[in-house]
Structure formats: C-alpha cells, structure tokens
Image: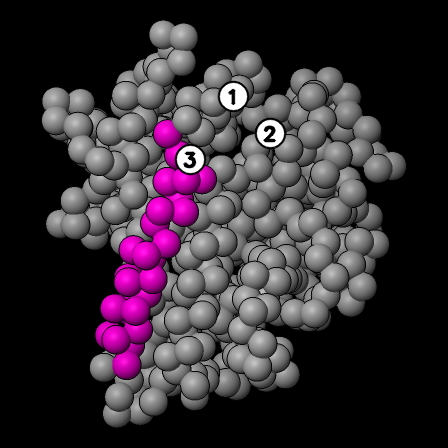
Amino acid sequence: MSTETSPFTETTGTARFAAYDALAARGPVQRLTLFTGVPVWLVTGYAEARAVLTHPDVVRSAGEVPHRDTFPAPLAAAMNSHMLAANPPDHTRLRRLVSAAFTRRRVAGMAPRIEAVAAALADDLAADGAGGDPVDLVARFAYPLPITVIADLVGVPEADRPAFRRWSSIATYGPAHPADVFVTAVAEMVDYLRELIAARTAKPADDLLSELIRVHEDGDRLSADELTSTVFLLLAAGHETTANLISIGTYRLLTEPDQLALLRAAPERIDAAVEELLRQDGPAQVTLPAVTRAPVRVGDVTVPAGDVVVVALVAANRDPARYAEPARLDLTREPAQHLAFGHGIHHCLGAPLARLEGRTALRTLLDRFPRLRLAEPDTEPQRPPGLLINALTALPVRVD
C-alpha cells in the first residue's frame, strides 16, 4: 500500500500536483494510506471519477468524521445530517427541500450585492496598497467577499461572522487540529446555529435561513439536526471553496501573463476563464470519503466491499486522457465538463453562486487594478496540508 506519495501533506501547488501526477502515472485508481492513517482507494482518472461518483454501490459514510473516536454522537448528528453526507432516498428528500429554498432566482438576485461588496473590498485594497506596500489578497479580498455574501444570504448577523469564520476554519481542516480544539469549535458552532435557528423561528426574516425553516413539501420539513447541519454546510462550503477559487484563480492569472493579457483584452471571456481556472487548479481537492457496499469495478481495479473510496477532483481535472496539455492554463480551451463541483447526485448545489462570485471578483480586480501583480513573484505561495480543500494561506500582491 502506497504511503510515499501523498499530495495531502504537500504545501505548494507544484509539489501537490507532482504527487498527484506520480500517483496517476501508476494508474487511475491507487491504494494508499492517508495522513490520517485511513487506507483508501484514491481515484485520479477523469472517466473513473465520473463512474465512481454515479455508481449506486459507492455510498457516503457518516462514520468518516475527523477525530471520530472522541466526537460525541449528538454533535455528529448536528453536523453531518446534511444532503452531502446522505444517500438516497434521504439525499433525494433533503436536496429537494433545500433546493426549494436555495433557488437560482435567489442567487441571481444577489448579483448587485456581490458587486457592491467586491467594489468596497477593492476600495480597501487600494487604500492599503496605495504606498506600494504588499497586501494579502486572501485575507483582504478573497475570504471577506464570499463570507459577507453567504452570511448575508443565510442571515448571520455581521457581529457574529468573525466567530463563525474561526469555527468554520477549524471544522473544515479538522484533522489538522487537536481533537479537543476540533470538538470545542464544532460544539460552539452548533450551539450558535441552534440559537440563530430559534431566533428566526420566532421572528422570521427575509433570508435563506428563514426560508429553510419555512420550507415544506407534503408536510415534510427539515429536522433540527438537518437544519443545523444544512446551515453549516451552506456557510462553510459557501465561503471556503469560493475564497479559494478567487485566490488561486488570481494567482494562476498573475503567473500567466499571456492569459491575463487575453482576459484583459477580451473581458467577455470571463465565464470561460472561471471554468478553466476551476478545471486547472480547483478549490475542492477531493470529495467526501465514500464506502463500497458491494465489490465495485473501477477501471482495471475491483474495489472490495466495505473499502473507503476518495475521488481526487483536482487530479481528474488534469487527466491527460481527457484534456490536452492538462496542466496548462488555456482560456481559449474548448469547453469540457470539469469535476470541480463534483458530479452526479452530489454535484454542488451552490455552483451557480460560486461562479457568480468568482467572475464578479476577478472582473472587479482586473478592472480596478491595471497593474495588479505578485509581490513575491519568485516565491510560490504556501498551501495548507489537508484532505478536502485546495487553498492558499496567503497571496501578497501589489495594487498600486
């Protein structure tokens, strides 16, 4: 079982993708042990990934919780009763209820607010970098934008957002934190969400949380645990992945002057640019772990029943069997369906919002800062080790 090549412990993009390439070179499905000590089948091939993500015998397992030996069962229920951790028919029911509240119309209506937030953050960047000093695009723009947007959408008061950002960061990078820190953060977050749900139940507002509380179909509603974990999923996934799309996307453009010049000259390519950035270096590293409930044939490999399967989305999106020169950023690439938002029944419900925020953020940065550039062009930015998220810890830029 392979342990020597692990993209999850690498701390730069170059090293991470080199590790994925080394694994993929041995075949699209490899057996390895994660840094958490869990043995898994890692799927790196595009065709194999699509097959796994739609296979009826590859199912989500609520047992794969960080620090699960010390994680209280009530907290697990409050955190993992959302649709991303569920299988049909529970998944079908949950997605139907959440989709009834989290509509495309509601997302489209956020466009003016997203543009206003991006413009205000750009004003702050301009002020911070007016003297030529470097500013951290991650801390000052990429994270505040989606946090503000999703918190506005869900209905989290502004004063509570810093605390939720801290809880979400610990929960998202669970294995990287000691068990007591992880459990405490999740417990505090669940307590807060329950209080917020109680407040909105007593006094509804014009926000997504109130709609999730109200929504019902044939007498069916979200339970207390389903509400808590759904709101956590929307808030956490709604800003972590989008923040990384913005920061990594900006970094990739700034390291590819010809592609940056192309986008500046043809701003109508912004939609295609977002899709290519999602494909080439997407924000979600892997899917949530799944388990085979029967032997499953994946490519040339038969995965035994009861084994854990993890799909490496970022690797599948660079599969040379699917894409020509897959590591190259090419904004003129013919559109090809990528897996950055997953595939099948668990395809990301928030993808339209992420795309809207991504193109608004990039368009704002390029329009506002004609001389936007890396402050440390010879130093590759660091990426936090971990399983789920592909992120930058910081991105120093100059905007003068």
Q: Amino acid at mark 2?
A: Ile
Q: Residue at x 37, y 40 (%)?
A: 106
Query: In the rendered image, which residue does mark 2 sit on?
Result: 345
Q: Earlier in the sequence, mark 3 or mark 1?
A: 1
Please state the horizontal and vertical placement of residue 343, each as a whole percent of the image: 64, 38
Secondary element at image label 1: helix
Task: Assign the N terminus to one quadrant of the image.
Answer: top right
Crowding at mark 3 (Cα within 10 Å: few <14, some 14-19, many 20+): some
Whether tag 3 and tag 1 are in contact, CB under 8 A, the answer is: no
Q: Earlier in the sequence, mark 2 or mark 1?
A: 1
Please state the horizontal and vertical placement of residue 120, each as a whole percent of the image: 25, 68
State left or right for residue 113 relative to residue 264: left
Query: In the rendered image, which residue does mark 3 sit on?
Result: 103
The magenta segment: 101-126
* Magenta segment includes 105: yes
Q: From the viewer's perspective, is the residue at label 2 or at label 3 nearer?
A: 3
- Asked if 28 appears above or below 38 in the picture, the reply is below
Q: Amino acid at mark 1?
A: His
Q: CA distance from mark 3 to mark 1?
A: 17 Å
Q: Residue at x 21, y 42 (%)?
A: 156
Q: CA distance from mark 2 to mark 1?
A: 8 Å
Residue 91: mark: 1
* Magenta segment includes 228: no
Q: Nearer the viewer, residue 330 or 82?
A: 330
Whether tag 2 and tag 1 are in contact, CB under 8 A, the answer is: yes
Secondary element at image label 2: helix
